Image: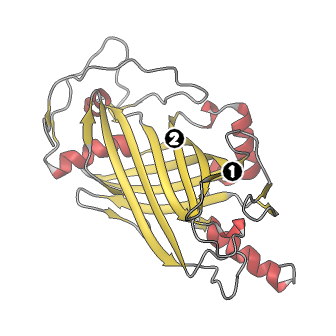
Amino acid sequence: MSNSRITRRHAVAALAGAGAVGLATGRADNGAEQGNHKPAPLELDLNDPVDLSYARQKVIGSVASEEIHSFMRFHFYGQVPGEQARRLLSMNNYIVDRWEPVKRGTYKLAHWEVGYYCDFDTDDPIESWINPYTEEEIEVFQFVLGPIHREYTPDTVIAPGLAPHPLTSHIMGPRFYVATEAIAQIPNLFQPDEWPKRSSGKMANWVSMQTLSALMDDVLNPELTSAPANIHLQNFVSWSSWMQMSGQPGGTMARAYGTEVDGFEALPQKVYDGFKKYTPEIFETATWDTIRFDEFDYFELMQERRAKGEV
């Protein structure tokens, strides 16, 4: 990486209005004074794996013991080989990350995440959805995940299953960009011979690419334990089982964007109410210690309904 030793203050670009949710304020270290106080910036050598991990961590989450909340907006598209992509639906997504430093450059994470589906490009929650490929109206199954435990080190990300591994980070203008990728293929819970309508095939595929960015000034600020970050994500995933695609080739393509927020109170009231109604678990992470995953939950529900003769 060019100019890897960062010792100067970077020019701060003017930020546009933050919109509905707003940018989070940076978390101050040890109650540092605000106002005109300008601490000397950190000296980081981004060729040093520990310094690089520390810098990335301030963007990804926090270098202190604290919770970081994020809000994201998803749009989902259907992609079938040889066909034009189709709009499917949208999602409001909320993440709670609880960070714990092990040592400089190494950090443990407990991750909780939920999302409720909406009509495409709206905040209007949906409980049923007309599949544009089959023209069937089907029940929507909301997204719930966590707690997922990971450990971020200078060398790798230690995690059970899928993990977002960092790519090369870059300084572009006043911002520091941290890109990650997560790629996996696993046996599908819904095997096609047993669940022909709900299966996307024998194997389920996942490709997820995320980019977080923050002002380099905030990364270098010794009084901030977390640099407020903007988040962008794209993924391509096998059809969700609840979509009932009957083995149709292809999958869903998602684009998402969001930011760290200061907590649930930063959400618009309509969005807050949606999380309360459809994914209330996210408000109870202090006691949410049983692992949840929407695909496993849906599989158990379908097994129960099959036992009752309902599917």
Q: Nearer the viewer, residue 308 or 253?
A: 253
Q: Amino acid at mark 1?
A: Tyr
Quadrant where the C terminus sits is: bottom right
Task: Identify the image quadrant of residue 222.
Answer: top left
Q: Amino acid at mark 2?
A: Tyr
Name which residue lies at 69% across and 44% down: 120
Q: Nearer the viewer, residue 59 or 250?
A: 250
208 on left or right of 227: right
Name which residue lies at 48% across and 30% down: 24
Q: x, y (%) of residue 202?
A: 56, 82
Q: Nearer the viewer, residue 119 or 12?
A: 119
- Residue at disc 2, secondary structure: strand
Q: Is residue 199 visible?
A: yes
> Alpha-carbon distance for marks 1 and 2?
15 Å
Quadrant where the N terminus sits is: top left
Residue holding disc 1: 116
Task: Identify the image quadrant of residue 200.
Answer: bottom right
Name which residue lies at 21% across and 22% down: 9
Q: x, y (%) of residue 122?
A: 70, 38
Identify the residue at the far right of this view: 309
Q: x, y (%) of residue 67?
A: 48, 44
Disc marking residue 253: none
Q: Nearer the viewer, residue 151 or 133?
A: 133
Considering only order in the chain, which callout, 2 or 1, is on the residue closer to the N terminus? 1
Considering only vertical position in the picture, is 184 above or below 128? below
Q: Is residue 63 visible?
A: no
Residue holding disc 2: 257
Identify the residue at the far bottom of this view: 193
